[in-house]
Amino acid sequence: MSTHKDLLSSPYYKEPGPKLDKESPFESMMERFRFATDLLKINEGMFQYLASPVQTTIVSIPVIMDNGEIQVFEGYRVIHDNVLGPSKGGIRYSPDVDIDEVKALAAWMTWKCAVVNVPFGGAKGAIKCDPKKLSQREIEHITRRYTSAMFDVFGPDPDIPAPDMNTNEQTMAWIMDTYSMHARKTETAVVTGKPILLGGSRGRKEATGRGVVTVTLAAMTKLGMAPNRSSVAVQGLGNVGAVSAVLMHEQGAKVVAISDISGAYYNENGIDIPAAIAYTAGNKGTLEGFQGCEIISNADLLELDVDVLIPAAKEDQINRYNAENIKARIISEGANGPITASADEILEKKGILVIPDILANAGGVTVSYFEWVQDRQGYFWTEERVNRRLTRMMREAFQLIYGVMEQYDITLRQAAYVYAIDKVAKTLAMRGIYG
Ligand code: NAD
C-alpha cells in the first residue's frame, strides 16, 4: 500500500508551501495538478497512480563520431500514462535535459490529450546532446540508434513520438525508417510530424496556431467581444504565433503588436500581418528592420492595453513581477507555460480570462492524432477536412472546459486540469487495477 512517504519521493510531488522565487513550468503544472486532485478529492492511492509514470526507459546510445571516436549519449522515454490509449509525446534533443524534466513533460502530455478528448495517453522522450555541436550525419546516427534501442517501446499501438525542441520532420523520417527496418515493413503510424511525402498530415504545421485562434474566438463570443472591434498582441512570431496572428487578422481583428527575439513592433492602427510574415520570410525568419511600427520591448508588448494577448514564444513570460500590469481581457497561451502559477492568482483577481496551454495549444496534438488515424487507414484527408475536424474538436473542448469552469466556479485553467484528471481517474477506475 502506498504511503505519504512514497508520495514525497515521487518526482511529481512537491509539499505545498511558500512559493519558490523562480518557478519552473513543471512546478507550476504540479501546483495546478494538486489543486485539481484536492478539488476532486482524489484519494492517496489514485494520487500515487496519477503522479507515477507507467514506464521509464533509459538507454545508452553509442555513436561513431565524424572524427572516428566513439561517444556515448543518454536517451530517455517516459510513458506517463496509457489508460486512455497509446501514449503520445515529442522527443527533444537538449544538453540540459534530465529524466525528471522528461517525466514532468510526459505528465503534461497526458493532461493535454485528455483535455481535447484525443484517445491518447502522455509520453515524452529526450536525448541528452547538443545538436549545435553535431553534424547532420552524427544526429542521424544518434536518432537511429536511439530508435533501435526503443524498438520495444515505440509503435503505432503502444507509443507514438513526435517532434519537440531541436527535432523536426527529418528526425521523424529517420525514426519511421529505422523502426520500419526492424519491423520488416513500413510503419508510418509509429511517429507523427512526418513530411507529407512520408505519411504526414496536411494542416499539421498550422494546427497549433489554428487551434489557438479557434478557442480564442470561442472565448471572445462568451465575453461578447466582436473580433472586428478587438485588438490583439502576439508575442513570438514563430510557427504558433505567425499562424495565430494571420488568422486573427483574417477574422478582422486589429493586430497592433507582434514580436520575436529581435524585439517587439507596435502600431496602434494595426499591423499588415501578411506583409510582416512576407518580410520575415525574406529576412532569415526575423522581424528585425520591419518598418511602419514603433519598436518596443517584449516586456512592453505584454503590458499593452489590448483585448487579446497571445504569448506564443516561451515559458514564464507573465509572472509575479508583471502580472499586475497586464491589461488584456483574454490571454490565450500559444506557448507552453508562459504564465507562472503565482501570476495565475493575480490575473484571476483582475478578471482576465486565461485560456490555458493544455487547451489553447492542443491543436498540434489533435492533428497529430489525425495523422496517426490517416496512416492507419492508409487514406489521406484534404486540408479542408483536417481543418474542419480540428476546429470542431477545439470548439467542443472549449465548451466542455468552460462548462466545468462554471460548474465549480474556478478558473478555466483549473477547469482544464479538473476535467483531464477526472477523466483519466474515472477511466482507470472503470478499467480496474489488473493483478
Ligand atoms: P518557434 O521556434 O517557431 O517560434 C518561437 C518564436 O518566439 C520565434 O519567433 C522567436 O524569435 C520568438 N522568441 C524567442 N524568444 C523570445 C522572447 N524572449 N521574446 C519574444 N519572442 C521570442 O516555436 P513554436 O513552434 O512557434 O513554439 C512556440 C511555443 O509554442 C513554445 O512554447 C512551444 O513549446 C509551444 N508549442 C508549439 C507547438 C507547435 O506545434 N509548434 C505545439 C504546442 C506548443
Image (cartoon, grey):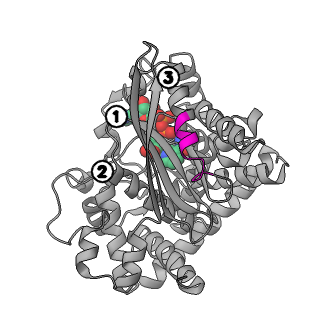
Q: Which residue is mark 2?
A: 318
Whole-angstrom CA distance, mark 1 to mark 2, is 26 Å
Q: Which residue is mark 3?
A: 138
Residue positioned 40% across, 18% down in the render: 69
Label annotation for residue 95:
1
Give the camera-side residue of 410 and 74.
Answer: 74
Question: Of the residues tagged 1 and 2, which is closer to the observer?
Answer: 1
- Residue 260 visible, this angle: no
Quick check: is the Cβ at mark 3 less than 8 Å away from ligand 1? Answer: no
Residue type at numbered disc 1: Pro
Q: Residues within 10 Å of mark 2 (few under 14, many from 20)?
A: many
Residue positioned 30% across, 50% down in the render: 318
Percent x, y of residue 166: 47, 33
Question: Of the residues tagged 3 and 1, which is closer to the observer?
Answer: 3
**Which contiguous range is marked in magenta?**
145-154
Residue positioned 39% across, 31% down in the render: 72
Q: Is residue 244 left or right of residue 327?
A: right
Q: Residues within 10 Å of mark 1 (few under 14, many from 20)?
A: few
Q: Is residue 359 above or below residue 195?
A: below
Percent x, y of residue 148: 58, 40
Residue type at numbered disc 2: Ile
